[in-house]
Amino acid sequence: MSQRIKSNTKRRRGFTYLWIFGLALLVFLLIYFEQTSLLYILATLGVTALLVVVAAADLGRAELSSEVTTQQPDAQALGSGISSRAPVRTPGKARK
């Protein structure tokens, strides 16, 4: 790994910790000064932003890439010692 990539990840990690500390301080101050109405509004906006990000995620592309893999073992079958009866998709066959 090159030196430039290492310094980039350290810088991003530092900004992440700074954001976490800043937001934790903001929440603490809002609770301390009893500004629960503002805290409620910020929490609602945060959850809304998270839902928008999840809704905009391209989940269809992830589904297509999982079909390319061969057979993934069935966790329940592995734990019980029996063989899995799950159908195996081959990468070359089209879906019906």
Image (cartoon, rainbow, N blue to C red):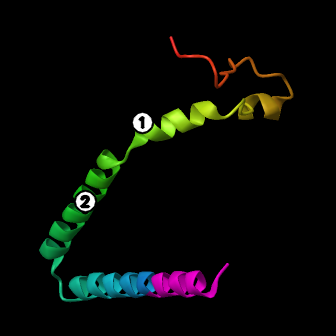
Label 2: state its secondary structure.
Answer: helix
Left or right? Give the position of 83 relative to 47.
right
Left or right? Give the position of 2 relative to 16.
right
Q: Amino acid at mark 2?
A: Ala
The location of residue 12, given as percent across then percent down, is 46, 82
Left or right? Give the position of 18 relative to 35.
right
The location of residue 10, given as percent across then percent down, is 54, 86
The location of residue 41, given as percent across then percent down, is 15, 67
Question: In the rendered structure, which disc, 1 or 2, sits on the residue that comes first in sequence?
Answer: 2
Is 62 contained in the magenta span? no
Q: Amino acid at mark 1?
A: Gly
Label 1: state its secondary structure.
Answer: helix
Q: Which residues are magenta?
A: 1-14
Vertical side of 75 occupied by 27: above or below:
below
Residue that appears at 32% across and 82% down? 23
Residue that appears at 42% across and 41% down? 59
Of residue 73 and residue 45, the one placed in the foreground of this image is 73
